[in-house]
Image (tube, rainbow, N blue to C red):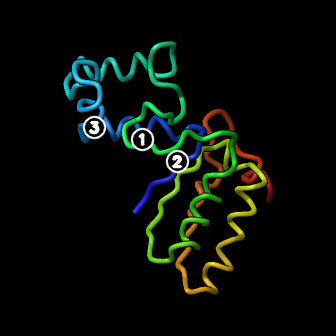
Amino acid sequence: MILVIGPGHGAPAALASLWIEGSMERFYPGEYDRNRKGLGNLISRFSVPGGHPSHINAETPGAIHEGGELGYALAVSFGAVMDKPDLIVTCIVGDGEAETGPTAACVLAAVPCVSRGIRADVAIGHGIRSSSSTRRSQVP
């Protein structure tokens, strides 16, 4: 089982989960401990110089690859499943990445996966965006 997180706004959820389950404390003892001070550090050091960036990077516990431009997380996920059909892959795509061409094309990739007997569920948070409604939600 693998978790693929796009390079956009999915990082806060991953960092919070890593803090809750203790990985941040194991990798950064004294900085992100599971106590009030550690939580304060996690919040105050998010997306500022010297803290964790607003995306998953090589300093994130368990991260294998730091992403590049938006749009390819779902493609990586589908590629992994098409290569190894028994693999369970969960992919988190942020609001901006959800509006890219590569992501739209990958949503359509569910059709060949299903025809090969691979289960491909795509859940879309329709209309959810960090600053305003998405273009997709404005289409009648």
Mark 3–mark 1 distance (CA, rounded to whole Å) = 11 Å
Q: Quadrant of residue 63?
A: top left
Which mark is first along the chain, 2 or 3? 2
Return the residue at label 2: 5
- From the viewer's perspective, is the residue at label 3 or at label 1 nearer? 3
Mark 3 residue type: Ser
- The numbered disc on residue 23 is 3
Query: Can you give x and y, in whole percent of width and height, for residue 75 in the image?
Result: 65, 59
- In this image, 29 relative to 47: left or right? left
Mark 2 residue type: Ile
Query: Can you give x and y, in whole percent of width and height, for residue 7 in the image?
Result: 59, 40
Mark 1 residue type: Ala
The residue lying toward the viewer, choosing from 26 and 99, is 26
Q: Quadrant of residue 8?
A: top right
User: Could you tell me if the residues under marks 3 and 1 are in contact, i.e. CB atoms within 8 Å?
Assistant: no
- In this image, 118 relative to 28: left or right? right
- The numbered disc on residue 54 is none
Q: Farthest residue in the left direction?
A: 35
User: Could you tell me if the residues under marks 2 and 1 are in contact, i.e. CB atoms within 8 Å?
Assistant: yes
Q: What is the crowding at mark 1: few (fewer than 14 residues within 10 Å), some, or many (at least 20)? A: some
> What residue is drawn where x is 53% and y is 28%?
54
Return the residue at label 1: 14
Mark 2–mark 1 distance (CA, rounded to whole Å) = 8 Å
Query: Can you give x and y, in whole percent of width and height, for residue 133 in the image?
Result: 69, 42
> What residue is drawn where x is 75% and y is 53%?
136
Eyeballing the image, is 33 above or below 124?
above
